[in-house]
Amino acid sequence: DQQVKQNSPSLSVQEGRISILNCDYTNSMFDYFLWYKKYPAEGPTFLISISSIKDKNEDGRFTVFLNKSAKHLSLHIVPSQPGDSAVYFCAARGWGKLIFGQGTELSVKP
Amino acid sequence: EAGVTQFPSHSVIEKGQTVTLRCDPISGHDNLYWYRRVMGKEIKFLLHFVKESKQDESGMPNNRFLAERTGGTYSTLKVQPAELEDSGVYFCASSQGARGYEQYFGPGTRLTVT
């Protein structure tokens, strides 16, 4: 049973525009949500996190929004840059461990 | 500050053989985690150490997998005997303190069992 889902396997965006990556979860007991970025042959790199008691967290070009009633979070990247092209994983922390979504491959075209 | 390191980066073994993966966490990090990604699917939790103690090993697939963290520093994950379905990328992560929910990952070990 998939507790964290990223329903879009891929997303293509023009450079300078906004990228919006989405994630849904099922368990209301998760206390933190995180986004990781992964390049091929590398490990996931931590990007940004949000506590379950918050609804927004911003760090530079990256903003994460949490909608607890909908059990939905999203990552906004503004403006998108070609170097942002990678696989993005959403993760939820429950009982100390991270539960990951399947990932969304973002392609930012010049 | 050095990040999480893993060795080897890639291992190819035959079914039935033994392989040992090593992880060195970020210095001072008490929490150490092992995860696995199989066939490009989602990254799945295997187990969690706090210092040298196993806090949670609920994700370990079966008793062919043995993880240790003697002295609370580096950790090893041994697969014995390896099966074809064990192929994948094994990631190690570490975290510490008040922001312990932020786990920092190593580059992974790609294991291929033939």
Image: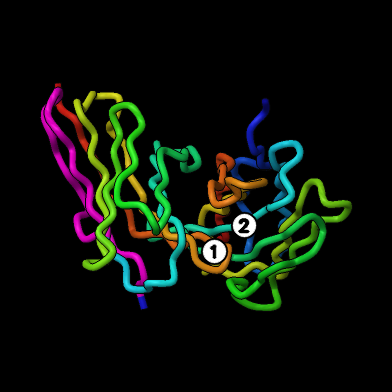
Give the x, y percent position of residue A103.
Answer: 32, 53
Query: What amino acid does circle 1 point to?
Result: Phe
Picture quarter with the N terminus of chain B:
top right
Distance between the alpha carbons at the discs numbered 1 and 2: 6 Å
Specify the label residue B69 is tagged with. Answer: none
Residue type (three-letter) at the residue carrying disc 2: Trp
State the extent of the magenta-drawn residues as a range: A2-23
Q: Is residue A109 above or below residue B48?
A: above
Hey, which quadrant is residue B40 in on the image? Answer: bottom left
**Residue at image coords 45%, 56%:** A32
Q: Are marks 1 and 2 on the same chain?
A: yes
Residue visible at 30% across and 34% down in the picture: A62
SS of the residue at dot 2?
A: strand
Q: Chain of mark 2?
A: B
- Residue topped by disc 2: B34
- How many numbered marks appear? 2
Drawn side of residue A89 relative to residue A14, left or right:
right
Residue indicated by mark 1: B45
Residue A25 located within the stretch drawn in magenta: no
Question: What is the secondary structure assignment of the residue under circle 1?
Answer: strand
Lateral position of residue A40 relative to residue A17, left or right: right
